[in-house]
Amino acid sequence: MNDVPEQQNGKSLPSRRFPAAFLLFAAPAVALLLSLWLGGTLDWELALGGILAVSITLLGILVPHFRHLDGLYRYVAALGRGSAMPVPPAGTSPILAPELDAALVEMAGERQARRQELVGALASREVIMANLPDPILLLGSGKKVVQANPAAVALFGRAIEGRDITAVLRNPDVLAAIDSNYHADDTEPRSSAEISFSLPGEVERQFSARIVGLDASTSDGVSVIVSLHDLTTVYRTRQLQADFVANASHELRTPLANLLGFIETLMGPAKDDQEARERFLVIMHEQADRMSQLIDDLLSLSRIEMREHSPPSDVADLHGILQDVAEPLEIKAKARHIRIVFDLGRATEVIGDASDLSLVFGNLLDNALKYGRAGSEVTVTTRHLSPEEDPAARRIGGPAVAITVEDSGEGIAKEHLPRLTERFYRVDTARSRDQGGTGLGLAIVKHVLNRHRGYLEIESQVGVGSRFSVYLPAPPQEQVEAPESLRSRA
């Protein structure tokens, strides 16, 4: 109902009509008295007294009547504005039947009850929409997004209410299913459809879209509902299961064959050969360790890939992570007479998962110690990057941190660099296996950084060394000094 103007020029509309009503009701009696006076039938004093009597009588009837009309008008105007239960007018009109007041009060009660029901229903819808884990889009006329729940806003990363659905979803099959509901004849029932599609991005995601057309639009114009269900985990699980079996069977074949060969030898020709048994047991232990490490790396990679579409939101202490990673590697560093030098300056926090980032820097430092020259240095540096000054931060999309691990090893030829993050890719297969490598370290690094919406840059020069730079998003906050234990480590 449209709002009714309660007053004009300081008076309610019934009050403004009071003079006209008074003149209309008084005119016949006044005209009669004047005609009698003019015809000489009635003395002027009696005519004037009659006119005053008529006026006073009319005022006694019309004033309370119009006062009551004013109250009724304000009452109806309050109902029209949707106010809370208004106060019904006091008193009664000498003209209007009291049943009118009772009918208006009853109507107000029914209206208020329906209003409360509607408000409650809308509030319930808001609560349900806000807590649904799946993205929901409610579409109105012109295929505009009337409402999007928080899950949808988080998925598309921007305010989408009021926008055309074609600016939000680009998949032609989904848009065609939505269009069919808008082009259907009013006499035809609206259709529903379920469509699987992929959503491109830094990490591609798989969704199932269910489109449901309503036979009648809701009070706020919603006529089509689009519900998205994330199937990325299901698709990844299937693919990872197949990859795990293929990779594990391929990589475990050689060490397992070696173990079986040594066991058969120890059970046969070398059954009583103490020297061979001791030598073979050492080799068998190394092969078993290699298989155990391979399985651990495969499981880590599978776990990371499973969550790759879900970026972390926690803030991680980068320098604490580096300190925890460096401590267990010091024994290996001392064995090769390699110094780990940290040049961290101000401590920096990053947005990330501390356990996953430990895998990243553990692999990079371990590789630097494996392939660095004996007696050299491995340097770890961190830098804070702002998007206004550095293209790497602009690529991240905000403040970023660069962590560089640099060694003075033999370096890597340029033709190998693009493939280093492929699983099981090795520049020197024999040397990698002798060093205990599984060929999965840099693949793990790549997928962890994909999940963190960061990236890895590799620079290397044969005979000089290699530099591995990790770029991660940083929270927009002031940094503090790195802990003394880390700044002084060598």
Image: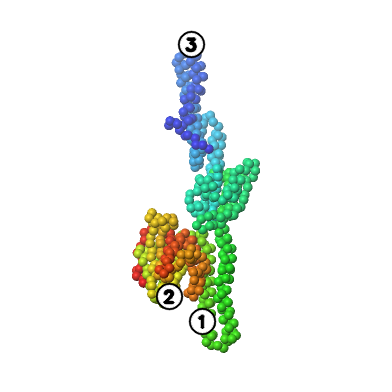
Q: Position of residue 275 (x, y in %)?
A: 52, 87
Determine if residue 434 is in view: yes
Q: Amino acid at mark 1?
A: Val
The residue that disc 3 covers is 40
Q: Nearer the viewer, mark 2 or mark 3?
A: 2
Residue 88 can be seen, yes or no: no
Pick the residue in front: 34 or 396: 396
How far apart are the two marked residues, 2 and 3, measured between alpha carbons? 136 Å
- Residue nearest the viewer, comparing 89 with 232: 232
Q: Nearer the viewer, mark 1 or mark 3?
A: 1
Sequence-first disc among 1 and 3: 3
Label at residue 282: 1
Q: Nearer the viewer, residue 13 or 381?
A: 381
The numbered mark, 2 or 1, whose residue comes first in the sequence reads 1
How far is the residue under mark 1 from the one under mark 3? 147 Å
Kind of residue sitting beneath label 2:
Lys
**Crowd around label 1: few <14 · some 14–19 · many ≥20 (10 Å):** few
